[in-house]
Amino acid sequence: MSTRSFDGKSLIGPAILAFFIISLPLLISNPYYLNVLNIIGLNTIVVVGLTLLIGYAGQVSLGHAAFYGIGAYTSAILSVTYGISPWIAIILAALVTATIALIIGIPTLKLHGHYLVMATLGFNLITNIIIVQCDSVTGGPSGFPGIPPLSIGRWAIDSDIRMYFLIWSVTLVAIIFGLNLARSRVGRGLRALHSGEAAANCMGVPTRIYKIKIFVLSAVFASVAGSLYAHYLSFVSPKTFDIFFSVELVTMVIIGGLGSIWGGLFGSTFITSLPNLLSSFDEYKDVFYGFILVVILISTPEGLILEICRKIDVFRKKRRQGNNDSRDKQELDTVGPSSISGLSLAASRQILREPLLRIKNMSKRFGGIAAVSEITFEVEKGSVTSLIGPNGAGKTTTINLIYGVYRPNKGTIIFGHNRIDGLSSYQIAARGMARTFQNLQIFDNITVLENVMVGAHSKPGSEFLVSMLHIPPYQKEEEMIREKSMEALEFFGLDEAADSPAGQLSFGEQKRLEMARAIVSKPELILLDEPVAGLNRAESMEIAHLIMKIRSKGTTVLLVEHDINVVMRISDKVVVLNYGTMIAEGSPKQVQTNEAVLSAYLGGSF
Amino acid sequence: MTDHLAQFIVAGLTTGSIYALIALGFCVIHNTTGIVNFTQGDFVSLGGLVIYSLLMSLKTPLIFAFPLSVFAVTVVGAMVERVAIRPARSRSVVILVFITIGVSVFMRGVFKILWGKNQMGLPSFSGETPISFVGATLIPQNLWIFGITFMSVMSLHFFFNRTRMGKAMRAAACNPKAASLMGINVNLMVLLSFALSGALGAIAGIIIAPITTLSYDIGVMLGLKGFAAAVLGGYGNSFGAVVGGLLLGVLESVGAGVVSSTYKDVIAFGILLLVLFVRPGGILGHSETERL
């Protein structure tokens, strides 16, 4: 599933929508159409939350009808049975829904994959049955009547038109919140975890917390919409909140194009009004509805809106290209990968005899196999330390253990002055470590620049509330991240490609992109897992040169590499692994003449 | 309670057999495409509806009506793949899943037009004379259900493990690219998996129709329960699907007997949630980890 954001960067969109909201009632006075518009508005509120959950975070929920229903029923019960003011009832209902979402989200969202779909599906069915069965509280299958309208002082919001303005104001706010969040650091983190959860975690995105937060937030959006629904229609019935409505809500998100808030508005308008448009077909309604759905999904994989936006975008790009051709060429001459000639790789070595990373007796078993056993070594501050060994020696496992992807069965890992074994990857990233991956882990659903910006996630920044409300520190912080990320891209000669989708880069470029993403947070220690594997000699030397440059800027490097040429040239210290145990440690020269190393690499003794 | 336990277990195993067949249908398609096929429940409905028309309207003898109905739904299953899944421009799992949801809505719309909204009754395969068996009373249809489910599971097992085509399907499921390089027509295998799921769904619908009231949307709830059974057994694991189906049937039936039959569905989906919370890989599965 790929997501691309076409949500613009300005307030023009919301302003146009506000204009439409104000002017539409001048054209439409028929209460039937107003009613349809109101339902569209309510659905849109749910869909905005769902778009963030499904399109951005990649977590599909089939339980949002239940959250909508819980919002509606809680509001109804509180305001009728307990006589609480409807406004307070809405807030309390949102709190109840948030709690329930939390209870479902915590166990299911710790897993990868589509467990949330299954859990929410079951949850929706159960909620529906419970509403039907508990008729003393909910009114059972015949519904819950007599819900009071909202009112401001003595002025009751009890007509279609009054409710229209209330519902659409809330919808507008929901859309603005959604857009703010989508464009923020948080939105970027969500899309990164959608593309690769473990990788995002290593970049400092607290993936599980993010998934839970966005799930709860989307449930709250649904709850508020449900409460408004109850106070609007003054009557709720369990049929409104069944599993089919959940399916319909997700369909709205998909039709609108996964990952586009505006698409969500379109999707909810389209799907909500479709049955009304088809009402004259009566008996054939379902057949048409199903047919249209299938045709749209087959022909426009990313939703109608994105399809249209794509066409416009292609057209715009073509026009822009005409104007920019000359300028682009000039830039090419000055920027680009730095040349390696004339620079000694063994430049200015200042190693402080102070260990930055200390690993003691670290062991890890997978089932019965000891992948790594009793490894002890140190990485000195300011050094390039290399980890080498034949295939299957446990090098990548060691990296993953250090980085908290796996937990060691035994031993300690000390980074700086603190133990880090047992911490999650994102916590380790926050302490000043960064890494690249042996199998490239590029977030291919966002741009090159955004990939690097995700790398800055390990630094503290605006979280959900600040991002959503667009509170001042936020803007400045984004500018800073963007600037630093551009610098990192320039450093690796990728600034030209900043705005292209990351998936379009060549293999070599993607490798450099990973390194740019790793250095943007200015880490104290960077773990490079086979940065030159698969590259030709010239490219390898260029990377070697860049590694030296990274080191000269004060970052310590722990390198896993097969290319002995590169390792011997740039390392201060080499640690050799074989079958999960350490067989040698020392300067490149010492290791090269070590007998155990020679026999491990060449087999037999010399 | 204990007096009735045997009876609850028999009832549970009966519906459990149906869940198992439906869960198997989910597995077969999941294994070749990675998607959840929401038309599975409609295959069940269609099986029951077609045999109803053959038996009641056309007076076809059961011995012909049974295979004919299975064949008809098998063809429909293959058509779903050919018409809606293969032409899709996206390979995204979510999009494909929602295409099957759209197809499901469409199919139910068609069933409603062709067979109406009324409930229909179908006679048992061989009379209603009860048989007593270790404290429980069985009707012959129970035995038909057990027997046919057992035969279906066995033939499916034989097909996947002993036949060339079955092995080719498993290969295509494991690694489509490698399978196609080995000369296996992966598209055909996906088509076959939909056909096979159609057949499994049809069998489930046909054998359960006599002991329930048939309607155009009978498969909706059964499909969801079958899905829960598949999750319970470890999604994608065929052996788990059978165990999950039977277990869900029994737990639901006994639970309904102990608590209240109005909460039968709550029990079924409560079990689903519990499994997902405690042992998400299913009782026979193991949860996966993402590789870096």
Image (tube, rainbow, N blue to C red):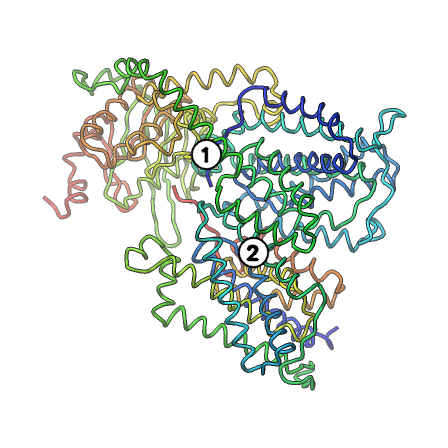
Which residue carries the number 1 mark? A200
Q: Amino acid at mark 1?
A: Ala
Q: Residue A359 location, x and y as percent? A: 36, 34
Mark 1 falls on what kind of element?
Answer: helix
Asked whether A384 or A355 is in front, the reply is A384
The residue depicted at 63 percent of the width and 85 percent of the height is B126
Write down the quadrant of residue A170 in the picture. top right
Of B156 and A256, nearer the camera is: A256
Which is more toward the observer, A232 or B58? B58
Q: Chain of mark 2?
A: B
Chain of the residue under label 1? A
Name the image quarter holding the C terminus of chain A: top left
x, y percentage for residue B219? 62, 63
Q: Is residue A228 left or right of residue A443?
A: right
Q: Which numbered disc, 1 or 2, marks the residue closer to the eye?
A: 2
Compared to residue A357, the image places residue B135 above or below, namely: below
User: Would residue A416 be seen by someone viewing this image from the given angle?
Assistant: no
Q: Is residue B159 above or below residue A135?
A: below
Q: Position of residue B6 (x, y in %)?
A: 68, 77
A425 horizontally vs A66: left or right: left
Residue where numbered disc 2 is placed? B38
Quarter of image, res A148: top right
Amino acid tagged 2: Phe
Residue A136 numbered tag:
none
Q: Position of residue B94 (x, y in %)?
A: 51, 46
Label 2: state its secondary structure: loop
Q: Is residue A163 visible?
A: yes
Mark 1 → mark 2, Cα distance in angstroms: 32 Å
In this view, the residue farthest toward the left is A606
Residue shown at 19%/34% (left/top)? A564
Q: Quadrant of residue A412?
A: top left
